[in-house]
Amino acid sequence: MGLHDGPDPIAAWDFQPRYLDGQTLKARIGPNATVMGSPMPGQTALGQCLVLNGKTDRFVATADYRTARQFLPTQKFTVEAWAAINMGQNDGSFMGVLQDNGNFEKGWSLGYNGSKFTFALSTKGADDGDGKLTYLAGKTDYVIGKFYHVLGSYDGKVMRLYVNGKLESESAAQSGDILYPETAVWSLGAYKDDDEEYPLEGRLASAALYDMVATPSGVSHLFDHRKEIALAEPVVQENPDFEWVVAPYQQFPTQDEITIMWETTRPASSAVYFGPSKANLTKVEGSLTRNPQSLIHKVVLKNLKPDSHYVYKVETIDDKQRKLESKLLTFRTAPQADKAIRFTVVGDTQDQPKVNTRIAEHMWNERPDFFMIVGDLVGTGANKRHWTNDFFASMRPLFDRVPLIPVIGNHEGDARLYYDYMAVPAPEYWYRFTYGPAEFFVVDSNRDVSVGSEQYRWLEASLASSKSKWKFVAHHHPPYSSDEDDFGNLWEGQSTRGDTRLRAMTKLYERYGVDVVWTGHIHSYERTWPILAGRAAAKGPTYVVCGGGGGGLETHGPTRPEFSNRIRHGHHYCVVSINGGVLEMSAFDIEGRMFDNLRIVK
Ligand SMILES: [Fe+2]
Ligand SMILES: [Fe+2]
């Protein structure tokens, strides 16, 4: 099935400027596509292509779904594309016609997810009611800016995914006719269904659909025919639009330093102007780091005065001299150990922007010195939109003016983007943070936390060396919890009443006088009594589960473990104030109504 010696496709497009006619892209065969946005001209090793901006640029093969169905194969088919990705994402697509909404999964898509190419298909043979998509993922980690030939085929029994002419994955999970949705968009250069639209940021050279199955030799022939495109060096086609991807935010405040970060659509200069007033600003330049999925600016302001209020603004200029300027913002440096402080705690914000926004408004109204998120910041750590659209965008102006103290959760998936966006001391998954009289020991509870593990040894040495009046540990998973079913189903039997992996660590908390252990993961509030050796005690570390930042709510078990003092079902956040030997903590629901109170005096 080569281009010259095999059957013709039933639909094929060359994404070249010369086939553009207004908002129409003329097809090589099949329906002319409608152009959304305004893709720019780009190059491949063999000619021209189109550059898609990842926002507005995409194509619709035919807007009329009934017409589309006349073209779309009923069973055996092959779909191929030549494309280069400039910005990785989850659920990207080169060509598809699908709905993937909860349990309703129909159609097919050829595209990419995280760092791999994917081919998804739902058939009548595997219909479990509303349909079920099988997502094949390839083996190749695609290189940003490099062209690939990606091909999916289905013969009625087996799905296959080829990258650059080679078979990378296959599955027999689907069989029989393709299960199409009742309505859908036959989309090119974007993942598109009723709920979601994820356009490609990158280059598209061609795409084709065949109503027959490509043989392995046919696939390698298709690749060989134009392999010069894949052999070319990667070209990172800059996004033509110069905009904020993430507006400025603050990281890791100390008595004399703070870090200001932001992300732009294009490479640009990195400068912060800061000072005691807007009439008295000093310019500091920083650096830009380009990673596969991010383009992040970082400026560290140094030699600051402790316990001081500053104003600042960010200025970033691209190579075409276009300038983005933030409004005048503010930050505060950390105070000395004898000063009073106030901070907020929340967990499990995980891509619920409607809830996140309300919680962030309440927290901003408290004017905290910083806010801590105890893990599950986003729904999927590898999904860039979860960071840019859901996380950062939903919690303004809190992010503009208050530094985030992060803790890594399981939903971050240890993704590169977590480390890209956060700037805390190496190795970043654990770190110490001192603020006034309080010191925080942040642990990654996804990793080994057993006796003698790297983190255990670090934590023991750190706690032993701490001279801070108040010691807090923060990690995502709770060693003590009343949850109904995460640690054993209490409606049917027994539970370990918390994550037993962390119980060894609790001995350190007890031995070294940790005051409060902040955790999340369970999306429901809980405050324990002070706990010693698993028992409610007069003195000892108090454990707070504060996972109410947005994730779907969870429920406590029917009976109470002894250590449990207060529980509350519902979204929530905590406010903590410390003055000398007095700590006051209050917990609030999503309406801002206080429902719990803790006072520790030492
Ligand atoms: Fe969570
Ligand atoms: Fe979690």
Image: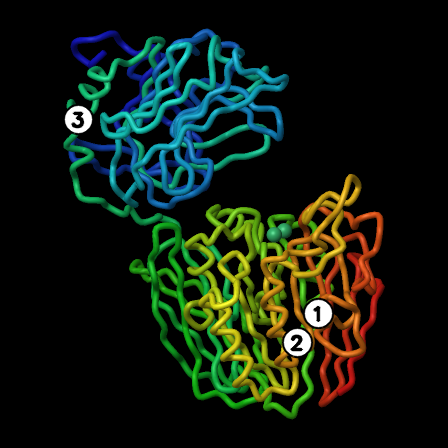
- Amino acid type for the residue under numbered disc 3: Arg
- The answer to whether residue 348 is visible is yes
Mark 3 residue element: loop
Position of residue 465 measured from the top left corner of the image (x, y, whole percent):
52, 85
Query: Residue 533 — which label?
Result: 1
Dot 1, crowdedness within 10 Å: few (<14), some or many (≥20)? few
Residue 101 picture quarter: top right
Left or right of 197 on screen, residue 513: right
Q: Around disc 3, counting alpha carbons within 10 Å, would you say few (fewer than 14), some (14 to 19), or many (20 or more)?
A: some
Q: What coloring was used for the rendering?
A: rainbow
- Vertical placement of residue 25 versus 495, above or below: above
- Identify the image quadrant of residue 163: top left
Inspect the image, locate mark 2, and give the three-letter code of the amino acid beneath it.
Glu
Going from N to C along the chain, the mark reached first, 3 or 1, is 3
Name the secondary structure under disc 1: loop
Q: Which residue is mark 3?
A: 226
| Quarter in which the C terminus is drawn | bottom right
Secondary structure found at label 2: helix
Q: How many numbered badges does the structure rendering display?
A: 3
CA–CA distance in space, label 1 to label 2: 8 Å
